[in-house]
């Protein structure tokens, strides 16, 4: 994700590529973007850029003038400048190309007046970035860590009583209200250089700092603190006394990235080898990583045991199971999340049929499901029952015999009743017939 240095380098890139260029016409927005339209149309205008923390501002300045040098409006032409504030999100950047080479995900485009035309594009693959026409710097963002250092330092130290500083230092460094421009890789590099565990209270780290930067005159910044295995109270004092100036490094470390120049941010070549070589902690082999309370990955210094295990695994291919024990964990600090786990970082190879929704794939999928259903499931043998006691066997036999006798008796009784009923019914029928005969004779 682009952070303060990348956004500043993006503004330098725009100023370099647009120097002397005259733009004209309408600003074009892509159809898929949900950001607002830029209602700016001008025959001739120039573009300049400035940065502040994690924001970049493009200023569109009209050039049309009459003979007296005064600006005038003609045919809906803009007679005032417009500021457009950009936030890069996860993948935003600027590109300056020919009209035929406009990138696929160019969501806002500014066209030059020359022929053939060239285009300044805001490119954002994931579309998390945004822009605001007639925008201003966000009021809830603090001063820039790089170019408003004194205001930034004063803003942090004058608000240490804020509840935000009750949280771990690694999470407070991402709070743009106080650390405008710091992101995930910068917080890892800053805390690594000072050897500060990421999950210690931010107030304990910052309380001992002075309002005036005592290292501003060029004195070296102390890079290490006392051993982190000291008791809790002594640990807090050691952090306050020997942690160096965290705010100072929040200013100087981003400037190191800026000093990499085009090697750190170069949309033309996309070469980040110099930046990767500059990193000491973030995504570096031998370092540890855990999720913080916000679900962001925090990289920090591993213990000596961790590095030893990594060495053996690399050199001798030995799987060391004891690595999961507490002895081999780097010290993240007392405020680390409970049951914090290191995120598994996998490079997923994209398959050719990831987005293939044809009938061929559906048939293959159904065949796969049918084969899985046909798999024989191993049945577990039924649990063995204990053999019954001999007395229980005898009692069961007696009960069975008794029930058998009762059923036989009931059957004999029922047959006897049937026979009796059959013998009685014919006699009654003869009596009824004889009675009818006598009544006829009497008549």
Image (cartoon, rainbow, N blue to C red):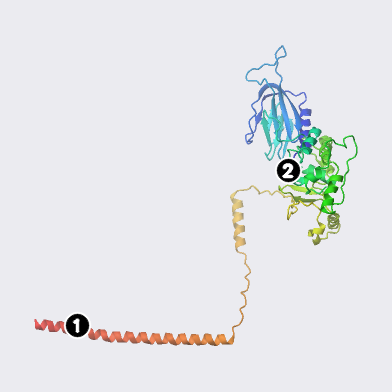
Residue that carries the numbered disc 2 in the rendered image: 164
Q: Which residue appears at 31% of the width and 86% of the height?
A: 419
The N terminus is located in which quarter? top right
Q: Which residue appears at 72% of the width and 35% of the height?
A: 141
Q: Which residue appears at 68% of the width and 33% of the height?
A: 131
Which type of secondary structure does the marked residue at label 1 adopt?
helix
Residue 351's disc number: none
What residue occupies the far right of the structure in this picture?
A: 219
Q: Can residue 194 be seen in this view?
A: yes
Image quadrant of residue 123? Answer: top right
- Across and down, in percent, residue 404 comes to 45, 86
Q: Which of 279 and 51 is in front in this view?
A: 51
Which type of secondary structure does the marked residue at label 2 adopt?
helix
- Across and down, in percent, residue 13 comes to 78, 31
Q: Nearer the viewer, residue 342 or 108?
A: 342
- Across and down, in percent, residue 185 comes to 78, 43
3D distance between C-alphas at marks 2 and 1: 111 Å
**Height in image: 144 above or below 414?**
above
- Across and down, in percent, residue 401 comes to 48, 87
Would you say 63 lies left or right of 365 here? right
Would you say 176 lies left or right of 36 here? right
Would you say 428 lies left or right of 294 here? left
Residue that carries the numbered disc 1 in the rendered image: 432
Q: Which of 202 and 73 is in front in this view?
A: 202
């Amino acid at each position: 994700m682009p952070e303060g240095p990348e956004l500043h380098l993006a503004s330098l890139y725009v100023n370099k590529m647009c120097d002397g260029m005259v733009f004209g016409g309408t600003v074009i927005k892509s159809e898929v973007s949900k950001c607002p339209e830029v209602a700016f149309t001008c025959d001739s205008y120039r573009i300049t850029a400035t940065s502040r923390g994690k924001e970049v501002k493009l200023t569109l300045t009209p050039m049309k003038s009459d003979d007296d040098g005064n600006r005038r409006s003609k045919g809906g032409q803009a007679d005032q400048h417009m500021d457009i504030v950009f936030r890069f999100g996860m993948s935003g950047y600027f590109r300056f190309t020919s009209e035929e080479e406009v990138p696929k995900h160019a969501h806002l485009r500014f066209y030059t007046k020359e022929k053939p035309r060239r285009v300044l594009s805001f490119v954002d693959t994931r579309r998390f970035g945004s822009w605001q026409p007639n925008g201003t710097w966000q009021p809830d963002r603090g001063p820039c860590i790089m170019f408003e250092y004194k205001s930034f330092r004063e803003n942090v130290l004058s608000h240490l009583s804020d509840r935000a500083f009750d949280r771990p230092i690694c999470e407070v460094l991402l709070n743009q209200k106080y650390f405008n421009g710091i992101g995930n890789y910068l917080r890892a590099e800053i805390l690594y250089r000072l050897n500060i565990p990421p999950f210690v209270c931010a107030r304990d780290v910052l309380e001992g700092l002075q309002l005036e930067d005592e290292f501003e005159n060029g004195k070296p910044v102390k890079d290490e603190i006392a051993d982190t295995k000291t008791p809790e109270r002594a640990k807090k004092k050691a952090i306050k006394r020997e942690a160096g100036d965290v705010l100072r490094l929040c200013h100087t470390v981003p400037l190191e990235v800026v000093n990499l120049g085009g090697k750190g941010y170069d949309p033309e070549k996309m070469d980040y080898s110099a930046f990767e070589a500059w990193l000491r902690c973030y995504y570096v082999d031998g370092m540890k990583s855990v999720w913080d309370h916000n679900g962001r990955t925090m990289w920090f210094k591993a213990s000596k045991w961790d590095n030893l295990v990594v060495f053996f695994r690399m050199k001798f291919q030995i799987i060391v199971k004891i690595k999961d024990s507490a002895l081999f964990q780097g010290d993240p600090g007392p405020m680390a999340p409970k049951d914090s786990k290191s995120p598994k970082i996998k490079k997923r190879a994209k398959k050719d049929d990831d987005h293939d929704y044809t009938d061929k794939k559906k048939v293959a999928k159904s065949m796969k499901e049918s084969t899985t259903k046909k798999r024989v499931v191993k049945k577990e043998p039924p649990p063995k029952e204990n053999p019954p006691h001999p007395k229980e066997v005898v009692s069961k036999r007696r009960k069975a015999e008794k029930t058998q006798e009762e059923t036989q008796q009931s059957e004999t009784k029922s047959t006897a009743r049937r026979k009796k009923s059959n013998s009685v019914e014919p006699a009654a029928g003869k009596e009824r017939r004889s009675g009818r005969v006598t009544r006829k004779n009497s008549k």
